[in-house]
Image (spheres, rainbow, N blue to C red):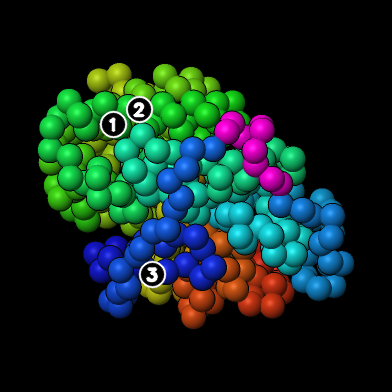
Amino acid sequence: MKASTIIYLLATGAAASRCKHRPGSSSAVVPTASASATVSAPVSATATAVPTSDVPATTATSAAPAGSGIDALFKAKGKQYFGTSADQGSLSIKQVAALMKSDFGQVTPENSMKWDAIEPQKGSFSFTGSDALVKYATENNKIVRGHTLLWYQQLPQWVKSITDKAELTQVLQNHIAKVVGRYKGQIKAWDVVNEIFEEDGTIRKDMVFMKVLGEDFVRIAFEAARKADPEAKLYINEYHLESASGTKVTGLNNYVKKWLAAGIPIDGIGLQGHLGGGNPSAAEMQAGMELLSKSGVTELAITELDILNAPADEYTKVFSACLAIDMCVGITTWGVSDANSWLPNDSPLLFDRQYKQKDAYKAVVELLSK
């Protein structure tokens, strides 16, 4: 795919901003952060689950009857989950809670596990939002994908300012040990490193981790995560991995092979899936996933799916590609409905702003029901 312009948008109703990538986008809004710097008690002691007992009848949404939603249908095809991103604020919306029950079996935190939210000042950790999400997931039998331990965005200035190799190594190891260790046994998979590649398949040179530590930051991060939770699946998460002909796919694939050969504990590759127009065919997407599956990892997942205007055929292409690859364990959309999307004007999700099923939703259900 063509290289896209990086865009920064404020998520509606979110406690912190998000940054993602859309092919062909050009507008920009600089993100800000507002995380608290307080230290929270362990998740089991402090987090308050989002109430779901007062969820309205499904006529207020178009939630599927129990056992007939996309998550159940996808699992019946041998996949582990169909999920979405959310945080404490969105989960408190009654319509979101209803759809979470009917259609989603996994949740990824949008912002509450990013560095600026959890450790805004050095050594000062705030787990309020992440604790609430994990507690909600536990009480509602949802899988959690942790997102994300290392990213060059939503990174506090105090981290960006570090120039000493030993100091940054210690800071990175400590951050990962604290966060992953806190949720040991409660999070199925972690996006350990996020968006570390350029479009040409090389590692970003402008982020502090590469400037100070060089390529070794990958080893440091993955080894720290493995030590903190040996059972969690550890992922590289990246955008623009939809086609086997892409230079980023080739570059990432080669790096992962090298890192695995060096003993770095990488379990999976996450394909974000922020798609615009002119997307690859289902066969091309499948070929891209097949190439990545040969890198030596044991899992692939589509981790942040949304598609401009949500065409039914584009959504079914993505699901078809995942179904065709045994190693593809699940699909996560980036948001429940257009009302909660980071791209509210692009109508990119399976449910509209009134939380009603779109044609794309119905097409996916039809595909999975065959």
Q: Which residue is mark 3?
A: 9
Crowd tier of the residue under label 3, counting other residues whose Cα lies within 10 Å: few below 14, some 14–19, many 20 or above: some
* Amino acid on which disc 2 is placed: Asn
Would you say the residues marked 2 and 1 are in contact, meaning their CB atoms lie under 8 Å apart? yes
Going by the image, does 188 lie left or right of 220?
right
Q: Secondary structure at mark 1?
A: helix
Magenta region includes residue 203? no
Residue at x 77% of width, y 60% of height? 98
Q: Which mark is residue 174?
A: 2
Residue at x 62% of width, y 45% of height? 132
Magenta-highlighted residues: 41-49
Residue 366, how many percent across, how many down? Answer: 71, 63
Q: Which residue is mark 1?
A: 171
Q: Secondary structure at mark 2?
A: helix
Picture quadrant of residue 228? top left
| Dot 1 or dot 3, earlier in sequence | 3
Residue 352, how many percent across, how many down? Answer: 64, 75
* Amino acid on which disc 1 is placed: Val
Q: Secondary structure at mark 3?
A: strand
